[in-house]
Image: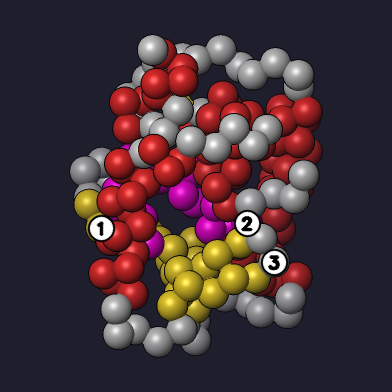
Amino acid sequence: MKLTGTLINYYFHCKRQCWLLGNRINLEDNSEDVRIGRVLHEIRADGVKNRELAIENVKIDKLTKDHLVEIKKSDADVEASKWQVLLYLKILKEKGINRKGKIEFIEKNKIDNKIVFLDLNEKNELELEDIEIKINNLINNSIAPSPNLKRGCKKCAYYEYCFI
Ligand code: SF4
């Protein structure tokens, strides 16, 4: 399966969430949190040129002269967001477009900065290749990982599926 930004984000957030999406069990439309995220994107997109750019199977929020910009509703899972952006940077690089990454968090709860910058380098490119293999292995398992209640589960599109 072709790796997407959402899959890699879910892989870091919750292996079960990644498996469910990877096996096309998609309950996103039922999630109020996802709807709020979409509306926030639309509000911020209003009047801004070159918003949301689709390249292959990824959608990029904004591409400026120097940065690929990803806009996140909250900083609840910074690590997952970072790997999502690194994947986008790698896909762009393969197309001959070199940029630095920039994540803008609309709600800041956990980290000090509302903006996080990151670079694609040899080390994280190799790690991305390894992660892609691990995600494919996970998705190809016939059984989903067990649900593991954690912070954020109640906001997850799969909450009812996992726990009710
Ligand atoms: S509800 Fe929790 S355990 Fe279930 S998929 Fe979502 S994050 Fe994972």
Q: Earlier in the sequence, mark 2 or mark 3?
A: 3
- Ligand 1: quadrant of the figure: top left
Q: Which residue is mark 2?
A: 87
Q: Quarter of the image holding residue 151?
A: top left
* Secondary structure category for the residue under label 2: helix
The dot on residue 106 is 1
Identity of the amino acid at label 3? Glu
Does the segment drawn in magenta span residue 70? no
In space, the residues marked 1 and 3 are separated at their CA atoms by 26 Å
At x 36%, y 39%, the residue is 31
Please check the rendered image and state whether residue 73 is part of the magenta-colored stretch, yes or no. yes
Q: Is residue 21 visible?
A: yes
Contact check, label 1 and label 3, Cβ < 8 Å:
no
What's the residue type where badge 2 is placed? Leu
Chain part drawn in magenta: 71-87
State how far apart marks 2 and 1 are (Cα). 21 Å
